[in-house]
Amino acid sequence: MQIADGLKAAKSGRLCLFGPPGTGKTAYGRWLADQLGVPLVVKRVSDLMSKWVGESEHNIAKAFREAEAQGALLLIDEVDSFLRDRRSAERSWEASLVNEMLTQMESFNGVFVASTNLMEGIDQAALRRFDLKVKFDFLQPTQAASLLQRCCVSLAIAAPDSADCGRVGRLQQLTPGDFATAMRQHKFRPLTSAAMMVKALAAESAGKERGRTPIGFIH
């Protein structure tokens, strides 16, 4: 709330939200717009990137103009696609994208929120332009247990017991996005107990662990 109150008073600011997928970066942007009482303009890579020379830069400028005209909070997802370190640029348009984004950020008279899953590799000059850089991380055990309780209330099923809360707290790399996935699964595979909810979350967690396993060779 402190950040929201400060931005409401200042009426402008540049935030970079970073962290793993599903940790709530985009949701925070939506919540922030609601707290500020302003419209929200969301742009993704598919909205801005073009195969035509100069078109991506045009789209970036247009997004900032649209947000400013509406007095809106501008949220750009996957901003790393537009702010890659210019020192490693192999094509002229890669540096041009960064330059255009920086120009628009500096001249924008509103609240700009950028989100990324890949903080590494972002242009250092771009990082200095952000007033705040906020990390969104995996859930802590107490946070996971609290979210489990809220989901059970939403599903109108019995509250989790201490064993359920303990199991969900031990799951690795759990995010709010995993809870959202389990809630969507409920539509066609009903979850009738907290234990079933934890089992669904464990499957999401296990999928991430498998994804981290390096490919090797057997000799």
Image (spheres, helix red, strand yellow):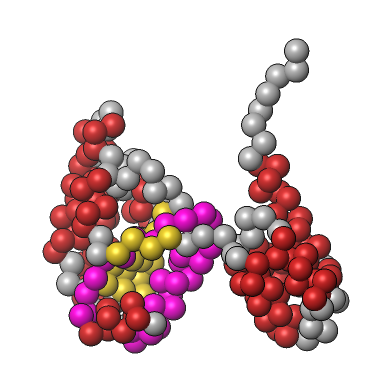
Q: Residue at x 61, y 72 (%)?
A: 143
Q: Horizontally, is 108 left or right of 169 in the view?
A: left
Residue 26 visible, this angle:
yes
Q: Residue at x 27, y 81 (%)?
A: 6
**In the picture, residue 92 is in which quadrant?**
top left
- Front position in the image: 162 or 144: 162
At 65% from the left and 67% from the top, the residue drawn is: 141
Residue 20 x, y percent position in the rendering: 52, 54
Is residue 139 highlighted in magenta?
no
Instruction: Tell me if residue 80 comes above or below residue 212 in the rendering.
Output: below
Q: Quadrant of the N terminus?
A: bottom left
Is 11 one of the magenta-colored residues? yes
Question: As displayed, is residue 208 above or below residue 180?
Answer: above
| Residue farthest top in this picture | 219
Q: Is residue 117 above or below residue 25?
A: above
Residue 72, quarter of the rendered image: bottom left
Q: Locate residue 173, reporting x and y percent.
A: 63, 55
Q: Residue 117 placed where, x, y %?
A: 46, 52
| Spot occupied by residue 90 in the image (x, y as percentages of width and height) | 28, 28
Q: What is the span of residues highlighted in magenta in the rendered image?
A: 10-37
Q: Quadrant of the C terminus?
A: top right
Q: Residue at x 30, y 64 (%)?
A: 132
Residue 191 visible at all: no
Q: Nearer the viewer, residue 102 or 44?
A: 102
Q: Is residue 86 above or below residue 49?
A: above
